[in-house]
Amino acid sequence: MSERFWNFEVMDPYELVTLTPAMVDKAAQKFSVTFPARYLELLREQNGGSLYLNKFPIADFEEGSIDIDYLWGIGKNGKQGVYVTSYLLKEWGLPKDLVLLNGDGNSWIGLDYRQNPQEPGVVYLESDSDVEITLAPSFEEFVSRLYREEGSDDLNMSLFEDDKTEFTQEEAEQAFADNIVLPISLALLHLTKVETDIDWFLNQAEQLLNNKNSTIVMEAEGTLMQILLNQPEQFTPLQLRQIKEMLAPLKKEWKWHSDIVNYAQKIEAKIKQMSI
């Protein structure tokens, strides 16, 4: 299985505040359950969010799999993440003793405590039919079977057919110099899909992180994280130290912009992990 589980987006609508032991205890008491150790381990890395491994195989389905684009984490205020379970079970007539992890009204993924209160399985249900499938007898096995569909990394961000989606280094530099958001976004997206010259990229990233446009700064942060995730073996200790130095000013210059500051901290956490 890939070591990467979350997609690590800059602005992930499903990501909640950093998980604390108190938040876990509060939710466990609310639902009278023990959360799977593997689930909590993943939430400590990121408290819910979009998944990098976003497919689960189901042989009986015509497509051979289902999409699982995100998992809910554990909210702080008792209304976010898995806390929506109580309302949704009642609203959609779903079985009791579930803790929902994903759902949209048509289909649901949840921890199933009906058979084993200490070690829940993971179940898939459909609201408008009698379909109920146990995906795995444990959350750990469920995670082990998730995968990323081949071709998921295709460039798909262009707004118009004539938008450029592949860039040489020189073309990327020109896009960065022109300081127009869409071409910069497309050039950065391209760099996450190919093997990138790290020294060259860090020089470009440093300039982009100093941009006055918050969108460009966030795009640069996101690309930096994706390249760290995609090419971890290419980074030297000196380059990792350089990234930390590049990120440091963001906390002061963008202290009013929590998304930029929080993501910078997330990159720093990744660097720390890589340095161990």
Image: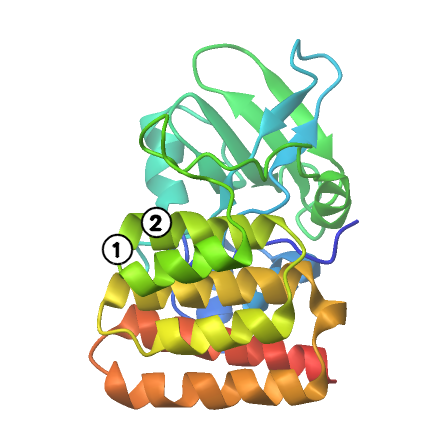
Is disc 1 in contact with disc 2, using a CB cutoff of under 8 Å? yes
For the question of whether residue 244 can be seen, the reply is yes
Q: Position of residue 93 (x, y in %)?
A: 40, 23
Q: Where is residue 139 in the image (x, y as percent from the top left)?
A: 69, 47
Which residue is more in the foreground, 219 or 115? 219
Q: Where is residue 176 in the image (x, y as percent from the top left)?
A: 36, 62
Q: Position of residue 173 (x, y in %)?
A: 43, 62
Q: Compared to 271, does 229 lie above or below? A: above
Question: Split into 4 quadrants, where in the image is the C terminus?
Answer: bottom right
Residue name at image x 33 percent, y 86 percent: 251
Q: Compared to 146, does 190 lie above or below? A: below
Residue 180 numbered tag: 1
Neighbours of disc 1 within 10 Å: few (<14), some (14-19), many (20+): few
Which residue is more in the foreground, 152 or 194? 194
Q: Compared to 209, does 140 lie above or below? A: above
Read off the residue under disc 2.
Answer: 183
Which element carries disc 2, helix, strand or loop?
Answer: helix
For the question of whether residue 73 can be seen, the reply is no
Residue name at image x 57 percent, y 71 percent: 200
| Residue 125 placement, left or right of 165 | right
| Residue 31 placement, left or right of 198 | left
Q: Which amino acid does label 1 sit on?
A: Ile
Neighbours of disc 2 within 10 Å: few (<14), some (14-19), many (20+): many
Indicate the quadrant where residue 125 lies.
top right
Color theme of the render? rainbow
